[in-house]
């Protein structure tokens, strides 16, 4: 299973692509959610705003769980500053 965790706009976009999503703006709340639900998901996309705030913890999660993919993606708000192809990111990560 795959999920995206982050701001409302990015979660909505990923839901349109068929992903589960959890809208969380607070980095510490997002980290707690990730830790509690790590076993549920094979791939977790985390918006860059959250990922930057919890980088050290995400790196630790990646090291301790090598079979889980935790991928940072630009949030939709950041994507407005530059073009982001979310479908291409998903294809690269999931191999589709």
Image (cartoon, rainbow, N blue to C red):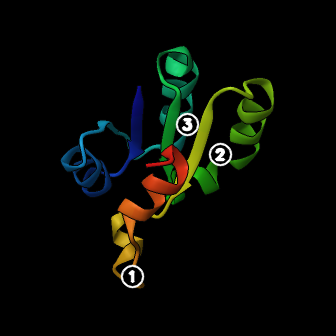
**How many angstroms separate mark 2 from mark 1 (CA)?**
25 Å
Q: Nearer the viewer, mark 2 or mark 3?
A: 2
Q: Nearer the viewer, mark 1 or mark 3?
A: 1
Residue 39 location, quadrant: top right
Please state the horizontal and vertical placement of residue 24, each as a whole percent of the image.
Answer: 37, 40
**How many angstroms separate mark 1 from mark 3 (CA)?**
28 Å
- Residues tagged 2 and 3 counted as in contact (Cβ below 8 A): yes
Q: Kindly tell me whether residue 56 is visible in this rendering.
A: yes
Question: What label sits on residue 25 in the rendered view?
Answer: none
Q: Secondary structure at mark 2?
A: loop
Q: In this picture, is 66 found above or below 93? A: above
Q: Which residue corresponds to mark 1?
A: 83
Q: Nearer the viewer, mark 2 or mark 1?
A: 1
Please state the horizontal and vertical placement of residue 90, each as a whole percent of the image.
Answer: 44, 53
**How many angstroms separate mark 2 from mark 3 (CA)?**
7 Å
Circle 3 packing at 10 Å, graded few (<14), some (14-19), many (20+), is few
Foreground pick, 91 / 48: 91
Q: Residue at x 53, y 16 (%)?
A: 36
Query: On the rendered image, what quadrant is the N terminus found in?
Result: top left
Q: Which residue corresponds to mark 3?
A: 28
Question: What label sits on residue 54 in the rendered view?
Answer: 2
Q: Kindly tell me whether residue 75 is visible in this rendering.
A: no
- Residues tagged 1 and 3 counted as in contact (Cβ below 8 A): no
Residue 82 location, quadrant: bottom left
Q: Residue at x 48, y 25 (%)?
A: 33
- Horizontally, residue 56 falls left or right of residue 70, namely right
Foreground pick, 44 / 23: 44
Q: Residue at x 41, y 41 (%)?
A: 5
Q: In this picture, is 49 found above or below 81? A: above
Indicate which disc, 2 or 3, sits on the residue closer to the N terminus: 3
Indicate which disc, 1 or 3, sits on the residue closer to the N terminus: 3
Residue 15 location, quadrant: top left
């Amino acid at each position: 299973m795959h999920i995206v965790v982050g701001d409302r706009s990015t979660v909505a976009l990923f839901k349109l692509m068929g992903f589960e999503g959890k809208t969380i703006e607070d980095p510490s709340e997002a980290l707690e959610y990730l830790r509690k639900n790590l076993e549920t998901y094979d791939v977790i996309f985390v918006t860059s705003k959250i990922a930057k705030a919890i980088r050290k913890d995400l790196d630790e999660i990646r090291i301790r769980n090598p079979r889980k993919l935790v991928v940072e993606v630009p949030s939709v708000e950041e994507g407005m500053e530059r073009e982001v192809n979310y479908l291409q990111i998903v294809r690269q990560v999931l191999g589709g």
